[in-house]
Image (cartoon, coloured by chain):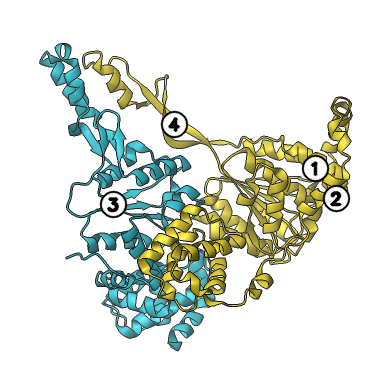
Amino acid sequence: MDETPNDELISNPARIAAGFSQLLRGLGIEVPLSRVMSFVQALGWVGLSERHSVYWAGRATLISDPEDIELYNRAFEVFWERKRPSGLDVELPAISVSIATDSDEEAADVDPQIDEDHGPTLQLRYSPTETLKDKDFAECDEQELDELRRLMGSLRFTSSLRPSRRRLPTKYQTRHPDMRRTLRSAISMGGEPIHRKFVQRDRRPRRLVLLIDVSGSMEPYARALIRFAHATVVGRTRVEAFAIGTRLTRITRELSSRDPDAALRAASGAVTDWSGGTRLGATLKEFNELWGLRGMARGAIVVLLSDGWDRGEPELLGEQMQRLHRVSHRQVWVNPLKHTPGYAPLAGGMAAALPHTDDFIEGHSFESLERLAEAVSA
Amino acid sequence: MFNFPDSPAAVSAALSDHNYLTDEGLSTVVYLAMTMQRPLFLEGDAGVGKTELAKVLAAWTGGELIRLQCYEGIDASQALYEWDYTRQLLHLRTAEASGRAESDSEAIEDELYSDRFLIRRPLLQAIDYSGEHRPVLLVDEVDRADDEFEAFLLEVLSDHSVTIPELGTLGSGKPPLVVVTSNRTRDVHDALKRRCLYHWVNHPDLEREIEIIRLKSPEADAALARQVALAVQAMRGMGLYKPPGVAETIDWSTALGKLGESILTEETIKATLGTVLKYREDQERVSGQGIEMIMAAAANG
């Protein structure tokens, strides 16, 4: 390939592969060594002479998410065609205000002595916690929010169970015989199945899907709710989290880190439309088409955390909620405005969505999120 | 006669001989999967021809197509092997009736757990294959299975052998050509993806789709094929609940061909819409405001 950036590299596919993988990693694509080795192996088969062979060999071995294809294409152009990488800087999502900066500041603000000083603070902390629990997130200062985030880490979810197709051995008599174990014991009884063994259906937790509104009107709540999403994602395996605003962003992977600060940093980095507008209907449609109706929402508990302010058409939101409702097990709408005196869910989007909502609960405070945890496990 | 391909172009030519048209990307990936002996992991919208590829690969290579359809709760006894309990029990009773059971229980146990009473499920069939050509193993819709199943699949696919406690290790040493498909209802574990070659299957572009129609439904003449392809491509841009895949395109043009139509008209579209669109809302949308748009798109071609 005469367009390779450095002539010295031509003779050495391994070097090329490593260099290219390095570039991909720089763009945030995870490329483990085993993949690089596969790429080298693949290059050995297709050769380096054809641009498209190299392209497809890399695409098959180095990435495995359709979301990464766009980044891969750009990296490929830069690396193999010596395009100026300036386009990269421009097009990479601009990371706007993020939780990360907040928590960094908080970390700096908090007097380290408080944390070290164990005995007395324990009691002092107790009472503010109690009052904090039903305090509106919007009225909390940074330090209180920090305290609440810690509390959320202690929330544990057990979502409702559904019968699984898997069967487990049981000592009780059921309608399903366990032939394998019955036969085993029959051998020692001279072929007589005296002890009959049984299986029963296993039960598994339902999948939980969280859709968090990150638009401007939700700003005071969104960060607290993302922290809440982190607590649920870490707590169990079958949770999916998305940020919705003007666009749909999947943040499950970002939130899966155990370290809350790292997880929040990653999630806020991934979301590019913090505090923007809301197109609830359109984003929900995107969710339905890309994830929800394909199977993610099937039999799942879907939780929408939003104030229902929507700049789009309410009919679209209603239609999409109905679509989602047809496949989901239960739909929960958490609206921080609900506790406001005199609030009625009349705003266009909210009114359209309400008929397709099983539970409508408030989400302005920690206590109300505890109630959500209960609603989910019901 | 199957000749091992020496380039992606050879793969593409061979597959089109079997009525499957690929693009450059897919033929390169298939070529690599065959030479590197890696499983092929295909993702893409429903109806873009993922499952079909496995069938065509089997027809081409002459290997048997062994299909494992995944579903929730699938486990080793449905995917790998199971003992034939009823026959085992019968055998045991016969032995008892002839008085062997007490004297020779160890020998009877050996008999019970022999190949004779083993039910081979798809994975075992593919791994322990005695035929001449490598079989093609299709693991369909792996995202429907539980995540525990993935770990199990990973183990089987990387070792190409299975150990059955009562029998020992089975495996023919001829790794099958594996095609894993997913509709992306959830993320499949990275470890499994890493072991595979990955390809995202797209809808075909216009010219290729016309070629596919011509190949798959010869009843439709060239003009109709072009119109249908244009119409379908227009439908994909309409934001439908379920945009039609290639499978639907083929159904539609076959239906039109069978009806003896040689041109798309508003009436024929209405009458045959059920072959392309499977949601009432989609049909309403298209017949409400879309048919003119589709007619226009089809007329432009």
Q: Secondary structure at mark 2?
A: loop
Residue at the spot 40% in from the left edge and 78% down from the top edge: B229
x and y percentages locating residue B275 in the rendered image: 38, 68
Badge nearest the viewer, 3 or 4: 3
Q: Disc 3 marks which amino acid?
A: Pro
Q: List the residue tagged with mark 3.
A: B176
Give coordinates of residue A353: x percent, y percent. 67, 55
Quarter of image, res B40: bottom left
Foreground of the two, A15 or A230: A15
**Do discs 1 and 3 belong to a common subunit?**
no
Residue under the image location 73 percent in, 46 percent down: A261
Residue A259 sits above or below residue A84 on the image: above
Q: CA distance from mark 2 to mark 4?
A: 48 Å
Mark 4: which amino acid? Arg
Helix, strand, or loop for circle 3? loop
Q: Check disc 2 and give the amino acid type.
A: Gly
Crowding at mark 3 (Cα within 10 Å: few <14, some 14-19, many 20+): many
Q: Give chain B's shade.
A: cyan
Report crowding for label 4: few under 14, some 14 to 19, many 20 or more residues within 10 A (C-alpha).
some
Which disc, if any, is residue A365?
A: 1
**Which secondary structure lies at badge 4?**
strand
Amino acid residing under circle 1: Ser
Mark 1 vs mark 3, CA separation in Å:
56 Å
Reply above or below: A90 against A264: below
Mark 1 or mark 2, which is nearer the start of the sequence?
A: 2
